[in-house]
């Protein structure tokens, strides 16, 4: 999507706690690129520019249809993190979202493993 105005962008980032609202990894673990503001329901599928339809994401999701909706779905009902850094989809929505967004790509698993290791200290 085109960048929202600065105030909207700041609001969405703060509301998300600077975490990707899909895989919950914080922006600071991806120093090389800025997470972007996505339409949860893509504009081409009737989604609006309202802040309730915007989410902070580390993925390109605009082209997708019904996946996990961070505003309407409860994360813990759709996903479960395992001890090895994977995100396990618990439902069709969770499994499809995890697969389509590549939530268990090697680099993402390595980052989550590092987060889990730091949490143990
Ligand atoms: Zn993400």
Image (spheres, rainbow, N blue to C red):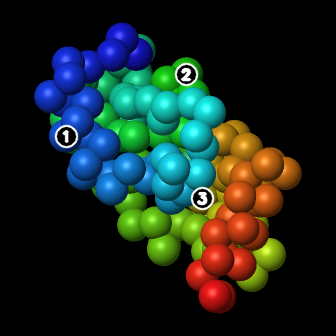
**Residue situated furthest right in the rendering:** 106
Q: Residue at x 33, y 16 (%)?
A: 3
Q: Locate the C terminus and report the quarter of the image it occupies.
A: bottom right
Q: Is residue 91 above or below residue 72?
A: below
Residue linked to disc 2: 63
User: Is label 1 or label 3 in front?
Assistant: 1
**Marks 3 and 2, Cα distance to the nearest angstrom?**
17 Å
Q: Horizontal and vertical percent for residue 48? A: 24, 24
Residue linked to disc 3: 94
Q: Nearer the viewer, residue 34 or 12?
A: 34
Q: Residue 23 falls in which quadrant of the image?
A: bottom right
* Camera sees residue 41: no
The answer to whether residue 74 is left or right of residue 110 is left
Dot 3 or dot 2, earlier in sequence: 2
Q: Residue 6 falls in which quadrant of the image?
A: top left
Dot 1 or dot 3, earlier in sequence: 1
């Amino acid at each position: 999507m085109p960048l929202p105005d600065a105030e909207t962008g700041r609001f969405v980032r703060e509301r998300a706690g600077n975490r990707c609202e899909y895989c919950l990894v914080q922006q600071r673990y991806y120093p090389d690129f800025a997470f972007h503001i996505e339409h949860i329901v893509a504009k081409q599928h009737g989604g609006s520019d309202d802040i309730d339809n915007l989410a902070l994401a580390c993925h390109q999701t605009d082209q997708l249809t019904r996946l996990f909706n961070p505003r309407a779905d409860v994360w813990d009902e759709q996903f479960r993190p395992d001890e090895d850094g994977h995100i396990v989809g618990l439902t069709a929505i969770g499994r499809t979202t995890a697969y389509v967004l590549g939530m268990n790509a090697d680099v993402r698993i390595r980052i989550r493993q590092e987060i889990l290791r730091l949490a143990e200290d």
